[in-house]
Image (cartoon, rainbow, N blue to C red):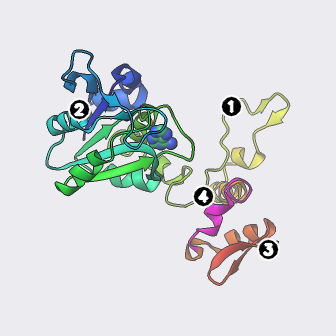
Amino acid sequence: MRIDVVSIFPDYLAPLSLSLVGKARTAGILDVQVHDLRSWATDRHHTVDDTPAGGGAGMVMRPDVWGAALDDVLTPDAHLLIPTPSGTTFTQRTAETLATEQHLVLACGRYEGIDARVAEHYRASGTRVSEISIGDYVLGGGEAAALVVVEAVTRLLPGVVGNPHSLVEESHGVAGLLEYPVYTKPPAWSGLDVPEVLTSGHHRKIERWRRDQALTRTAARRPDLLAALDVAALDKRDLAQLSELGWVVVGGALRPVAE
Ligand code: ADE
């Protein structure tokens, strides 16, 4: 996969040389190129922004500078991603879809964002354009969001994560549940023991305990995920555990009893 990132703070993307993403690049699985938007600015001061049309606070990024940059960086099969708090929510499903692409281009805006004509123009010219938000909070710019997107996508590329099974059980994996708690050695630490079942060697019991823990955590922390769960994927033991947690199937969906 090829990923281009365009930003006025190229140094912000330095972590893309580290850890999992850095290894994927060294292994030749991923080709990442970071570009300085200002190198496409044509005036003496390398201006990339101007005052908002219609007035108001802050500055808006100029479409002509972005257009020059994106004309150079986009390829016919590229998917243009624009991180913005007003985008559709980036989820594990989005990461899975993007991991099948050949070429992603991330356009990192700053200030009040990028002139809306940029997304409109590239959409009209046949480029796939997605404006994406990594969560309901406002960052200073798209760079931190770009780091999030690149890392979430890269770990799904074939050959990057050693054991692909860990991609199934983890939080927001296909099970639709949060992951169960994990433990390692030493067996006793600070007066706290690793749960006995995990050292029993009884694989079926361990699997059941982990599933119950995942259901318990999800009920406590993310009830919205339980409500969206496909009940056909639940077995009798799941339903028993859920009923202990106060969740029952009503009209084909899980609902809290107290509601
Ligand atoms: N830029 C500023 N805030 C953002 C967010 N929440 N997601 C993506 N890009 C952003």
The residue that disc 3 covers is 257
* Residue 160 location (% of width, % of height): 36, 38
Image coordinates of residue 163 in percent, x first then y, are 43, 44
Q: Is residue 236 visible?
A: no
Residues tagged 3 and 1 counted as in contact (Cβ below 8 A)? no
Which residue: 56% across, 72% down? 230
The residue most toward the front is: 54
Residue 119, percent from left and from top = 29, 49
Seen at 56% across and 47% down, the residue is 136
Vertical relation: 131 (above or below) 62 = below
Which mark is in front, 4 or 2? 2
Disc 2 marks which amino acid? Val
Disc 3 element = loop
Disc 3 residue type (three-letter): Val
Q: Is residue 223 left or right of residue 50?
A: right
Instruction: Compare marks 2 and 1 and give the one earlier in the sequence.
Output: 2
Q: Secondary structure at mark 1?
A: loop
Looking at the image, is mark 4 or mark 3 nearer the viewer? 3
State the residue in front, 242 or 252. Answer: 252
